Image (cartoon, rainbow, N blue to C red):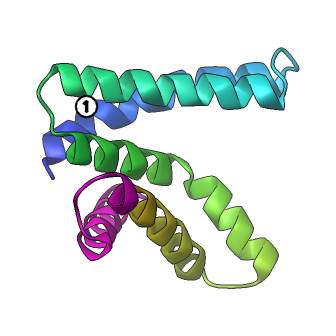
Amino acid sequence: MDKQLMDIVLPGLARRLHKHLERYQCGELDDDQLSKRFASVLQKQYAWLAERGVPEAEAALVIHAAVLVLSGPGLRAEASREGVPLEVVERRAVWAAAREVADSYEISQHRATRQLSAILARYGD
């Protein structure tokens, strides 16, 4: 996966998703509204990538990877709550994302897992 692509996608997603999260925390959005806004942001990012000729599977991997990176604080909190190493929780999250991508696109779950893990290792805290 192209590092430059992730460098473009990650900051933009972070800004847009953070804006909606702040509105949620201020009580301006409820759970359902937040979920719909997040889904809309992700769909728009996917469409933007497609318009620029990024193959569907690669776009899905980039978006899933960005979400995993941005979920770092939540993954750390989950690991702490469960009393397990962060790597255990990250592995479950990567595996679930890889399965979703593999089920939707013509790539193996092994390849998706490998790519998502590599991105998370590079961009995660």
Q: Find disc 1 in the rendering and name its residue.
A: 8
Please, is residue 99 above or below residue 68 in the view? below
Please, is residue 100 above or below residue 63 in the view? below
Q: Which of 59 and 7 is in front in this view?
A: 59
Q: Is residue 110 magenta?
A: yes
Tell me what residue is drawn at x 83 percent, y 14 percent. Answer: 28
Horizontally, residue 86 falls left or right of residue 29, namely left
Q: Nearer the viewer, residue 11 or 40?
A: 40
Density class for disc 1 (Cα within 10 Å; few <14, some 14-19, many ≥20) is: few
Horizontally, residue 106 falls left or right of residue 13, namely left
The kind of secondary structure the magenta stretch mainly shows is: helix
Residue 87: x %, y % from top left: 52, 79
* Residue type pointed to by label 1: Ile
Tell me what residue is drawn at x 61 percent, y 20 percent. Answer: 19
Range drawn in magenta = 101-125
Residue 73: x %, y % from top left: 63, 55
In this view, the residue farthest toward the bottom is 84
Tell me what residue is drawn at x 51 percent, y 46 percent. Answer: 70
Query: Can residue 125 be spotted in the picture?
Result: no
